[in-house]
Every structure is written in C-alpha cells, then in structure tokens.
Image: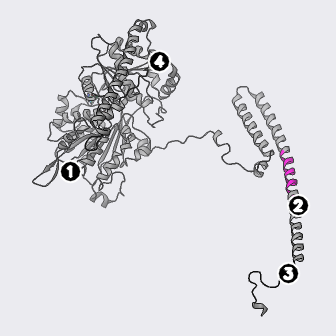
Amino acid sequence: MDLFAIERYGGGDPKPETDKSAAKSSHLQRLLAKIEENKQKLEDKKRRQEVLINRLVKTKKKKEEEKLEKEQEQSKSSSKKVKKRKRDQTEQEVQDNNAQNGGEEKDIAGQFTVLGDNFSKQKKTKVAAVLPYWMKNPSIISGFLKNLTVTVHDLPQLDKDIVKKLEKNGITHFFPVQHEVIPWLLESQSKPPQFWARDVCVCMPTGSGKTLAFVLPIVQALRNRFIPHIRALVVVPIKELATQVHKVFLDYIDITDLRVVCLSGAESFENEQSQLVRYSEVDKKFCSCADIVVTTAGRLVDHLQATPGFSLHHLKYLVIDEADRVIERMHNDWLYHLERHLISVDMRKVPPLTVREMAYRQPPPQKLLFSATLTSDPEKLQTLGLFRPTYFAYESKNSENATDESSGVKNLTTPDELSEYWVACDIAMKPLYLYHLIKEGDWKTVLVFVNSLEKVHSLAILLRFMFQGHKNKSVSELSSISKHRDRCFNSFVSGHSNILVTTDALGRGFDLAHLECVISYDCPLAPRVYLHRAGRAGRAGREGIAITLVETTSMKQFHKVFQKTGFLDKMKEKTIDDSVLESSQDNYQKALEFMKNKLQFDHKKISETIRRDKFKVRGGKLKGGKKSTTVGRMRQKKIKTKSL
Ligand SMILES: Nc1ncnc2c1ncn2[C@@H]1O[C@H](COP(=O)(O)OP(=O)(O)OP(=O)(O)O)[C@@H](O)[C@H]1O
C-alpha cells in the first residue's frame, strides 16, 4: 500500500528538527567554500591578463614610437600622416587604459573588434551615383544659337501652314533643340497605337527655344481631331509661366480649330470651368470645350476635384515644363490626383510589355519633360514612371564634375551671349551699389532678384525713393504676396515699368525679349538657381548681362561654390568707385528713413484692415466656410521693419 501513499501538504512522518538544520548548515558551508574558490580563480585570471596587457601595451608603444621616429626622419612633408598616427596612438592608449581600468573582458584582451566604436571618426566613402542607361547615353544637341543652318522649310514632317505661321512670326531657322526634338516627336506620333510612344526628357540651356519644341508637334498632332477632348496637358510651376506658354499655343492654333485653356488663377475659377466643359442638354452629358490645357500643378488639382465633367481620359500628351521644379513641388501631389483621375491608364506603373497589353490597352500619355536643369537623380525621376525614356541634352562646357549637389543636376552652363559679373559689396551699402549699377547701366529693363518675400517690398520702396525724378526708372515689385501681382507683372512686360524686384518665383521660364539685365541682389542659394536667374537675359541668341552682388562676408562661400560649378571662369569682377557711392549717401540715408516709415505705416494699415475684416467676417471666414483671402494675404504681408 505504501507504493500508493501520496504525501500531500507535507503530510507523513516529520523528520527530527536537529537532523534537518545540521544538513542545511553543511550545505551552506560547501556553497560558501565554492564561491570563495571561484572568486580566487577570477582574481588570478584578471591578474594574469593585466600582466599580459601591460606587456602588450609596452611593446606596442615601443613599436609605435619607433615607427613615428622613422617617419619623422623620413620626410617632413608627410606631417599629416604622422599626426594621424599620433591620433591613432592616443586613441589606442585611451582604449588600453580603459581596458586596464577594469573594462569588459573582451575589450581588455583586445581580441575583438568593437563595432561602431570609431564610427564617427571614420571617413565615409561616397556612394557613386549610377545613372540609368538612357541617361548615360543622351542624344547630344548643340547649345549654340548662332550660325543656324536648319531653316523652317528643312523639316518635311512639319505642315506647310505651320511653317508659314513660323515665318510670319519672324522665325526663319530652327534652334538646335527644335530641329532635333520636333521631328523625333512627329515620328513617334505617326506610328500605330500599338507602338506606344516613348517618353522624352529634354535638358537644354535657358532661352534655347524649348517651348516651341513641344508646342509645334502637339498642335500638328491634334489639329485633325474630330471631337474636342483634352488631349494635351502642360503643367508648369507658376501662373506667369502658364500665361506665357498659353500665349505661344494661342499663336499657333489660330490656323486650326483647336482650343487651348489656361488654368492658373489669373481668371476666376468659374470662368475657367466654363472654358473647360459645357453641359449638353441634348446628350445629357458634359462635353469638353478644350483640346489643350496649360495649368499650374495646384490649379489642376483644384479642377480635378471640383469641376464636374472635367475629364483627362483622352490624354495623349503630358508635358512638364521646368520639370525638376514641378517634380520637387510634388507636395500638392498633383501626380497622385492625376493618376487617380486616370485610373484606367495607370500612369506610374508600366505594365508588362506583352503583345496583348500593347494591342488592347489604352496607351499611357506620352510624357515630355523639359528643363534647363533636369535632375539626373533617378530616384526623383522614378516618381514619374517614365516609359522607355529617351534623353536629349547639350554638351556642357564646364567640367564633368560641375554638378549642383543639392539637386543632382549636371550640365550647368549659361548661354554664351550672356556677360556675367560679380560685385563685392559691404552689406550696409548693398542698396547703394544696386542703385549705382542700375543708374550707370541705363538698361531699358532690369530684373532684380532677392531671396525673401519681405525684401521684395522693402527694396522696391527704397529704389522707388532713390530713383525719384529719374527718367525711365519706374520700379515695380512681384512676389506671391504682392497685392497687385498681375498688374505689376503686366506693367513690366508691357514696358511701363523698367525695374522689377522679385523672388525666384519668376526665376524660371520667364521670357521677355527686351530684358537686358538681371541682377541678383542676394547671392543665389544654389548654382542652378543662379543659372535660371541669369538665364532670363541673354536668351535666343541675344546679348544680355547678369550681375551678382556678393557680400564681403560670404565671399569665400561664393567663390567655393561658383568655382566648383565652373561659373566663375566666365564671370568678371565689377567695381564701383567709393567716390561715386559717397555722392549719393545723403539720398540713401533719406531713402532708408522713408522706407522705415513707409513699412511702419503699411504695417499699421494692414493690422487695421485685418481688424476690420475680422469684424465684418467673423473669424476670418466667409459664408461658404472659405477663408477670406484678403485676411490671409494681409496676414502674410505683415512685413517687419528690418534692415536690408
Ligand atoms: N527658332 C527660333 N528663332 C528665333 N527665336 C526663337 C526661336 N525659337 C524660340 N525663339 C524665341 O526664343 C525665346 C526663348 O524661348 P523659350 O522661352 O522657349 O526658351 P526656353 O528654352 O523654354 O527657356 P527657359 O529654360 O528659360 O524656359 C522666346 O522669345 C522665343 O520666341
């Protein structure tokens, strides 16, 4: 029965207490002895290691010292190497000391590599960018706009009445980009739909005639359409550029019955909507009124979301002018909205190219990318999902390494016809330098670039005061917060004002035939920004001047960046005599005082208007829940009275 007896809850016969405690104490004794023994062993081991390390360190030191002495003797010029070795030696010593002072066993032994220990001190190797094949092998086009050889009659693919129109507009010869890209595009369009057209990237200098290179093939390809649908969409970064491209299209579609619409915010949203679509009472559906749409990215998204019947399902061409800028400004995610709209077309993902796919699937719109500084960063271009792209580029005169590192743009070359200067100036006297440059130059039109919105207004006030009483020196200003943006722009374009102070918003694409000089009042923040600013002059083979004011404090940085990109080789230094500057000191002081008062006055006025607006429109909201734009603009325009 004992076999089945279970001792529950300590049940059963209890053993005598004395036996139990004796066993316990003997066990404890044994354990303590074992611990003591282990301790002893560890200490012995440590002592042995310390001896070993000391010996190692000593021999290492000795070796290092010998090496150092040898090196010092060998050459004095290799002092850098010696320093490095010294640094390494001290580092090693620090490590060894750490080890001796009871560091971890593996550190002490020096047998293991401690990962990440010297990480920050090591020089990181630069990863070389690997360009895709199509980008590495572009079709090279000359950027030279003089001695043109290809006349407008030399392209047999071009319709006769387009040629006539060109001649009527005073264009007798094609620029290199035009006689290369136009036939290529016309040929790609003439193929049957199963042969999907390849996408095109064009990187040519400023003012080399890129606009006509896409306008003419599109007009020719669409002119024989029967039913109007939006078949070409041109996306540009700013409103003024949209108006400009729209005008070029208008000029060449008057020989056809195509219709082009500009969506840029220059007109009211309702007006734009009525130009885009109309509702047919007969068919009981929306019909497109436009064939070509030129738009800014933001306005496109607005219409995609709020214009009923606005359809891009028949899109054949998607042109992205100033492509690198538009890609950068993906923050409003226009491509995502466009893609969602064209869900059946699936813009970004190229499907597997099987015969079935090519034959039955609607071809994606052909993408045409144009810029003077097209990024060579494949990651950025990846967002557009280009289909077997082909690349047209010009031969850069600058060194191979002339790259804008911030954007990965290669080929930074300004037009040959552009004379470039830089002027070293003291920060406190900068406006005075600008005043004298404009006064002496006596150019018909001057574009002045600054780096911030606030400066546009304050510099314009200052110049207006200083040029009081001068003939042909009226100053206007243009920025995203300018109150009369359109009026100022039109007055400059029409020649009513001669000096326009602006930001880089107008630094791209803007084309004005009579613009003679571009002045960067603030040094451009990146080489490609300089390239676009300077490129507003010296366009289409005409002479032009670009001047950059460089503050003495940032001279070093300027030289470093501009030397690297090769711009400095072409630039000359321009100086202004101190005596000349002194002659207008009084006028300058008065202008500064005036500017200060005017800014304070403006500031007060704006605050009052905001208060009044708030009273009228509670919480700055209009009836439909929309924010009052005047309030918004005024708030932004609260300009601080800060010095220039
Ligand atoms: N074949 C030509 N002959 C004469 N002038 C031309 C020709 N093609 C274009 N132009 C003129 O050259 C000027 C610059 O053209 P366009 O604006 O297309 O340059 P772009 O390459 O787009 O410059 P950016 O890169 O600055 O935008 C325009 O005034 C245009 O009318």
Q: Does residue 413 show up magenta in the picture?
A: no
Q: As displayed, is residue 632 above or below residue 345?
A: above
- Residues at marks 2 and 1, CA–CA distance in whole angstroms: 90 Å
- Spot occupied by residue 257 in the image (x, y as percentages of width and height): 14, 41
- Residues at marks 1 and 3, CA–CA distance in whole angstroms: 98 Å
The residue wearing badge 4 is 427
Query: Which residue is at the front of the view, 360 or 29?
Result: 29
Span shown in magenta: 41-53
The disc label shown at residue 37, or none: 2
Local SS, label 3: loop
Q: Is residue 127 left or right of residue 482?
A: right
**Residues marked 2 and 1 touching at CB (< 8 Å):** no
- Magenta: predominant secondary structure element? helix
**Residues marked 3 and 2 touching at CB (< 8 Å):** no
Local SS, label 2: helix
- The quadrant of the rendering that contains the N terminus is bottom right
Query: Which residue is at the front of the view, 538 or 154?
Result: 538
Neighbour class for label 4 at 10 Å: few (<14), some, many (≥20)?
A: some
Q: Earlier in the sequence, mark 2 or mark 1?
A: 2
Q: Can residue 540 be seen in this view?
A: yes
- Residues at marks 4 and 2, CA–CA distance in whole angstroms: 78 Å
The residue wearing badge 1 is 309
Q: Residue at x 25, y 42 (%)?
A: 623
- Spot occupied by residue 121 in the image (x, y as percentages of width and height): 65, 39
Q: What residue type is labelled 4?
A: Ile
- Spot occupied by residue 492 in the image (x, y as percentages of width and height): 27, 23
Snapshot quadrant of residue 57: top right
Q: Earlier in the sequence, mark 4 or mark 3?
A: 3
Mark 3 or mark 2: which is in front?
Answer: 3
The residue wearing badge 3 is 15
